[in-house]
Image: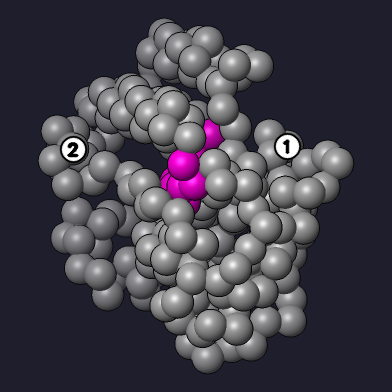
Amino acid sequence: MEPVKHDLKNNSLITLAGTVGVGKSTLTNALSDTLGFKAAFEKVDGNPYLEDYYDDFEKWSFHLQMYFLAERFKQQKRMHEEGLGYVQDRSIYEDVGIFAQLQYDQGNMTTRDFSTYHSLFEAMVMNPYFPKPDVLIYINGSLESILRRIESRGRQMEIDTPRSFWEDLYERYQTWIVNFRECPVLHLDIDQYDCRSEQSMKEIVRALEELQQADEPRHLKLSSMTKNGTL
């Protein structure tokens, strides 16, 4: 897709958020091309804990969350130091607000481990020196649409995961995003919008510009984009 002229800052950080399988990587690629920004992806291939985690949540949840926290913090620091525009395919805030909390609530992470993890997150991220995203794009959709995407991409460890896990994760995201106030939020729905449509991408860019120029963080939901497919 051809780049779109925009008024976003040259060093803008646009971060995507949303449950597993919702289409973050696809939109990251499309949006980075549209804006002329670099893309930053979650490290899945080569992750030393991911397969073990899906096999035994209780044994490996703490290890996986610590790994993701460290990798995402290093990524965030590197992007800030480079001073370039980036589109990032998952936010660091989801690590503690969604995934670590889920494992703790389900008894897969001890109180001691969760407290250690949470304290480290607070020290690393929740301070005035941590570079926050300029805008967070929250991608959502119906649970059934998301489950179809998970099945179609064919990661066996995800396909074998019980439906109840995905239902719980989905509901947690619905609650989490309502209370998110770290930066402006743009809401997109995979059942309505198409990141392969030039018109759709232009409307997303215009919304990002509006949110970046806002005086304070707020939520904006696009509801009039042309649908030619799915994210």
The residue drawn where x is 45% and y is 81% is: 196
Which residue was labeled with disc 2? 47
Name the one closer to the observer, 151 or 22: 22
Q: Is residue 139 left or right of residue 22?
A: right
Image location (x, y in percent) of residue 91:
49, 41
Q: Is residue 190 magenta?
A: no
Q: What segment is highlighted magenta in the picture?
A: 84-94
The residue drawn where x is 18% and y is 37% is: 47
Image location (x, y in percent) of residue 201:
56, 74
Which residue was labeled with disc 1? 181
Q: Is residue 118 left or right of residue 199?
A: left
Residue found at the far bottom of this picture: 228
Is residue 81 in view?
A: yes
Name the one closer to the observer, 172 or 89: 89
Check disc 1 and report its element: helix, strand or loop: loop
Which kind of residue does numbered mark 2 sit on? Asn
Is residue 168 in view?
A: no
Check disc 2 and report its element: helix, strand or loop: loop
Marks 1/2 in contact by CB < 8 Å: the verdict is no
The residue drawn where x is 53% and y is 82% is: 198
